[in-house]
Amino acid sequence: MTLPYKTATVFGGTGFIGRYVVRELARLGYRVKVATRMPESAYFVRLYGTVGQIVPFQTNLRDAASIDAAVSGSEVVVNCVGILYQNRRSKFHRLHAEVPSMIAASCAKFGVARFVHLSAMGVDKALSQSGKTKLEGEKKVFEHFPAATILRPSAVFGPEDRFFNLFASLAQKLPVLPLVGGGRMKFQPVYVGDVAAAVIASVVRTDTSGGIYELGGPEVMSLRDVYNYVFKATGRTRALMPLPFALAKVEAFFLQMVPGCPLLTTDQVESLKTDNVASPYALGLADLGVGTTGMELIVPGYLERFRSGGRFAETRAAA
C-alpha cells in the first residue's frame, strides 16, 4: 500500500483507543509522534513499531505553543483525548472542548492534510456535561478545520476497556447490582480494533473530509442485557435492583468522592438517560469500508479472569 502521508501525531495515544490507533498507524509505516504530558508513560507504545518509528513527544495541552510543536511536521493528526469523569486536574470542558479547539487551530496553522477527531455517540442529544462538552468540541473542530473527520463511537470494548471489565468487577464484588433508570438505556458496543480501523480509513480516504461517522457494533443491548451478558461470560449470577435516576444521583454523589477511579458519578447517571445507539440515517463503519466485530469473538476471552476461581477454574475442575 502506498501511503499518502508519512508522519502522524496522535494526542491521547497512551489511552485505551489511542494505543490501538498508534499501533495501526505504525503497522502501515507511518512515523508517529505520541503527544503526551509525561513521555515516560508512553514508552510502552514504542514496542508497536520499529526502532525510532514511534516517538513519545512531551506536550502541555494547556499551552498552544506546545501543541503547535507536536503538530508541526505532521501531515496527519488524530485526537483521542477524552475522560470518563472529572477530577481536580482534569475537567470536561478543558479536555473535550478547549483542547480539540486548540489542536484544530494548530492543524489549520500548519496545513495538516488530515485531522481525525474522536468524539462519542449521542453527543447531539446528550444531557451529561461530558456529552455536551464533546459536542462543543466538535463544533470548535469544524470551526477551525472544516475538513476534519469526526468519529463518534458507542461504548468501546476490548481487553483494557472500562465497560465490560467494570461491570464484571462489580459482579465480582457486590451481591446486588443497580439497574439505573430501570436498565432500559441502550448501547451498541463497538470493538476498539474496529474504531482504530475507522481512524485509518478516515486518514487514507479523501472522501471522509468534513464527515461525522457514528461507530456501533452489530449488537444493540440494554443495561440489563449488559449485566446478563457479563453474568454468562463470568459464570456469576447477581440480583439486579432497579434504581430510579433520582436515587442513583444521590448514591453517585457520594461514590464520586472516593479517591481514584469512581464506580459511578452524577454525570454518568445523566448519560444513562439517553440511548447510545447509532442513528439509522448516520454514516457508519460500513461507509468507511470497515467491518464490525461481534462481542462473542473478543469479550469472553478477557472476562475469564473474573470467573470464580480465576481464568483456569474450569480446567482445574475437569482435571
Image (cartoon, helix red, strand yellow):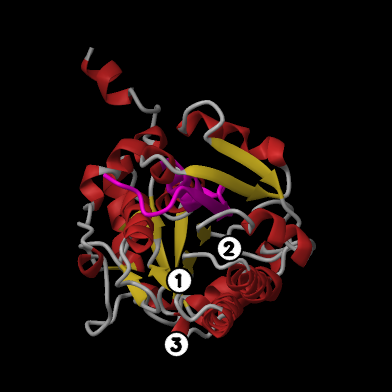
Q: Amino acid at mark 1?
A: Ala
Precedes in sequence: disc 1 or disc 3 = 1
Q: Which numbered circle lies on residue 125? A: 3
Q: Amino acid at mark 2?
A: Gly
Residue picked out by circle 1: 120
Residue picked out by circle 2: 82
Measured from the top left, where is residue 67 in percent x and y?
70, 60
Whether the magenta-drawn stretch holds residue 317 is answered as no
Q: Is residue 65 left or right of residue 112?
A: right
Measured from the top left, where is residue 75 in percent x and y?
50, 57
Kindly report the distance in space between the C-alpha atoms of the residues bearing marks 1 and 2.
9 Å
State which quadrant residue 282 falls in: bottom left
Secondary structure under the numbered disc 2 in the rendered image: loop
Dot in front, 1 or 3: 1
Residue extent of the magenta highlight? 1-23
Kindly report the distance in space between the C-alpha atoms of the residues bearing marks 1 and 3.
11 Å
**Is residue 159 visible to the viewer in this orientation of the structure?**
no
State which quadrant residue 88 falls in: bottom right
Q: Amino acid at mark 3?
A: Lys
Residue shown at 42% from the left, 82% from the top: 274
